[in-house]
Image (cartoon, rainbow, N blue to C red):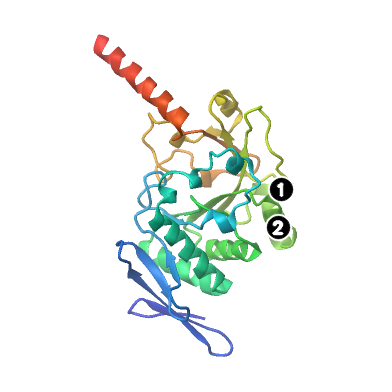
Amino acid sequence: MIIRKLNGTIEIINGREEKAAYQTAKGNNGKNYVKKETVADCYLNIPDEGNSKTGKHVINLNFPIEYTCDHRCECYKDGICYAENGCYLFSDNQRLYSENYNFYKNSTAEEFVAALQLAINKTRYKFFRYFTCGDIINYKFIDCMVKLAKNNPGVKFWTYTKKYTLVNIWIDCHPEYQENVKKTGRILPNLAIIFSHWLNQDGTYFPMNNPYDLPTSEFIPFGKEEQAEKATFICPCSDPSVNVTCETCEYGCYNLYKGQSQALKEHSTKQTKQRDAEIKAAKKALAKKQ
């Protein structure tokens, strides 16, 4: 049972009356975290200001890729993994991701869900994005995602994953959700698990086992942009001329269903930045002539 207290803490009490207390607070960087009192230096970092791509009112949960991603995947081998570049490599961010991982590994599923619920209760945001960095860790984490989505039907949850086999096995072992998955491509109406797919430079995709026809995200590398037209919609974040976030997107990955796909063009890399700069310069020159 979960008890909310006026001072912001909650207690989770099991049959043996053991207690684990959590409390929200602000760290030295000004961001909110949830501290687990029963484990020293164990924090769950849930920023309440979102980021420039997802939007200000979107909850984000991240893990370090070292312990969560499949390093055999093409995005990692190609060196275009976004979590291996830019702000994701900042020492402060790496520390926060590692603390999240430590918190998860030291918590039961019930404890972890209750801690995430604090973030939802505090912000009242209607969007929850898992993993701008990281991936589903294990079977228990899917249990947590399903439980949290079931407890918050008014919140839209979504995640990208390359842990195809893990998700398929979870669905195989939960027949109570299979009919809904077969009809809609979702375990729950407000939880979109999107299989992240990678197009190689030779025009072929790496293998993806998707027997339940869950929605997919197709990464389109530089020079292969024509492949994006096959998708249900193209993510606007890969277009520098479009000012949109997940929160304000007309489509939204969280609205993908059975058999649908989103194309994510390569962006924010050396090649694409040079191309985008040339496009902007050409537009500026044309505007002056007019």
Q: What residue type is labelled 1?
A: Tyr
Horizontal side of residue 46 vs 214, given as left or right: left
Q: Which amino acid does label 2 sit on?
A: Ile
Is there a contact, CB below 8 Å, between mark 2 and mark 1?
yes
Q: Position of residue 192 (x, y in %)?
A: 57, 50
The residue drawn where x is 59% and y is 62% is: 146
**Above or below, 268 relative to 152:** above
Decide which of 166, 144 is in the foreground and name it: 166
Q: Position of residue 206 (x, y in %)?
A: 69, 38
N-term-proximal mark, 2 vs 1: 2
Q: In which quarter of the image is the C terminus?
A: top left
In the rendered image, is residue 206 in sight? yes
The residue drawn where x is 60% and y is 26% is: 227
The residue drawn where x is 66% and y is 27% is: 202
Name the disc covering residue 232, or none: none
Horizontal side of residue 24 vs 197, given as left or right: left
Q: How far apart are marks 2 and 1 (CA)?
A: 9 Å
Decide which of 3, 101 is in the foreground and name it: 101
The residue drawn where x is 44% and y is 37% is: 237
Residue identifier under label 2: 171
Residue identifier under label 1: 212
**Above or below, 258 relative to 2:** above
In the rendered image, is residue 216 in sight? no
Horizontal side of residue 256 vs 212, given as left or right: left
Q: In which quarter of the image is residue 174?
A: bottom right
Query: Element type at marker 1?
Result: loop
Query: Element type at marker 2?
Result: helix
Q: Where is residue 11 in the image (x, y as percent from the top left)?
A: 46, 81
**Above or below, 217 relative to 106:** above
Decide which of 89, 62 is in the foreground and name it: 89
Crowdedness near tag 1: few (<14), some (14–19) or many (≥20) residues, C-alpha within 10 Å: some
Residue occupying the far bottom of the picture: 16
